[in-house]
Image: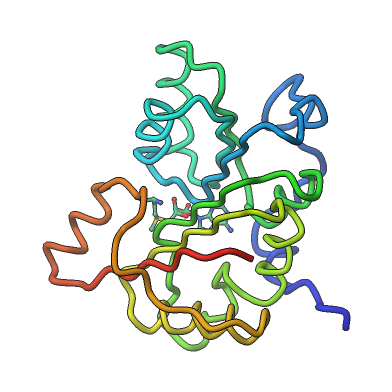
């Protein structure tokens, strides 16, 4: 069955023509497929990247379209001469398509925008097309970690995954390796419930 690419990804943000626009001289094929590759989608101000690059020697790839956050994390990387973090600016779906298949061990998507209004649901990053793309780009032994502070979106994400991959999921009883970011602190101060889905695709 062919899964159509949602129009939103092609039209809403500018199309990504090649990866060179975002980082010079990065040859993805040079990354040995046996190395540990972590991807952070929608890193916002980059707090999760700062946290993970202090914890791990893994190659960290990170995508966001938020210019202010990108500048902040790029400045941090330059200042601290961090060699293993690679930042990409643009739509995560468009950029992910440039990566070789079976590339990532782990993909984190912390607090993707919930687009709560029904007419905006089509803008949600998690959908059938995106989930299948995640599966294509991850190694067989992979971990996908998605968190949200929006109960309806959490249930929607869970259903999408279960329906697409014919699996049964449970929300995680813990936060896994996810650090606390300002975004989460704000959500907690508003008494929102945080949901984590940690699973293998
Ligand atoms: C609510 S913020 C969460 C930030 C961060 N993960 C945290 O936990 O603090 C969502 C982030 O996802 C980014 N984002 C949303 N849709 C995206 C897309 N299609 N491609 C890349 N980034 C996206 C936004 O720019 C924003 O920075």
**Quadrant of the rendered image containing residue 127:** bottom right
- Quarter of the figure that contains the N terminus: bottom right
- Residue at 71%, 51% (x, y): give it: 139
* Residue 190 in picture, x, y percent from top left: 14, 68
- Residue at 67%, 31% (x, y): give it: 35
- Residue at 48%, 56% (x, y): give it: 109
**Quadrant of the rendered image containing residue 185:** bottom left
Q: Is 157 on the left-hand or right-hand side of 13?
A: left
- Residue at 74%, 28% (x, y): give it: 31
**86 up-or-down from 9: above or below:** above
**54 up-or-down from 7: above or below:** above
- Quarter of the figure that contains the C terminus: bottom right
* Residue 131 in picture, x, y percent from top left: 66, 69
Q: How is the image coloured?
A: rainbow
* Residue 169 in picture, x, y percent from top left: 49, 79
* Residue 29 in picture, x, y percent from top left: 82, 30
**61 up-or-down from 94: above or below:** above
* Near-viewer residue (146 or 142): 142
**12 up-or-down from 115: above or below:** above
Q: Is 142 on the left-hand or right-hand side of 67?
A: right
Q: Residue furthest front?
A: 141
* Near-viewer residue (24 or 178): 178
């Amino acid at each position: 069955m062919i899964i159509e690419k949602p129009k939103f990804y092609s039209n809403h943000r500018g199309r990504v023509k090649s990866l060179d626009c975002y980082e010079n001289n990065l040859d993805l094929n040079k990354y040995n497929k046996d190395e540990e590759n972590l991807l952070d989608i929608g890193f916002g101000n980059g707090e999760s990247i700062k946290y993970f690059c202090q914890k791990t020697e893994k190659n960290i790839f990170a995508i966001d379209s938020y210019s202010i956050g990108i500048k902040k994390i790029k400045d941090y990387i330059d200042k601290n001469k961090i060699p293993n973090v690679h930042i990409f600016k643009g739509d995560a779906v468009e950029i992910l398509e440039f990566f070789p298949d079976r590339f990532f061990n782990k993909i984190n998507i912390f607090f993707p925008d919930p687009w709560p209004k029904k007419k905006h649901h089509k803008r949600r990053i998690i959908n059938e097309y995106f989930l299948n793309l995640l599966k294509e780009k991850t190694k067989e032994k992979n971990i996908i970690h998605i968190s949200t502070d929006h109960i309806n979106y959490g249930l929607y994400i869970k259903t999408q995954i279960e329906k697409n991959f014919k699996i049964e999921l449970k929300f995680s009883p813990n936060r896994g390796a996810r650090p606390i970011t300002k975004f989460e602190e704000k959500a907690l101060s508003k008494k929102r419930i945080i949901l984590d889905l940690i699973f293998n695709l």
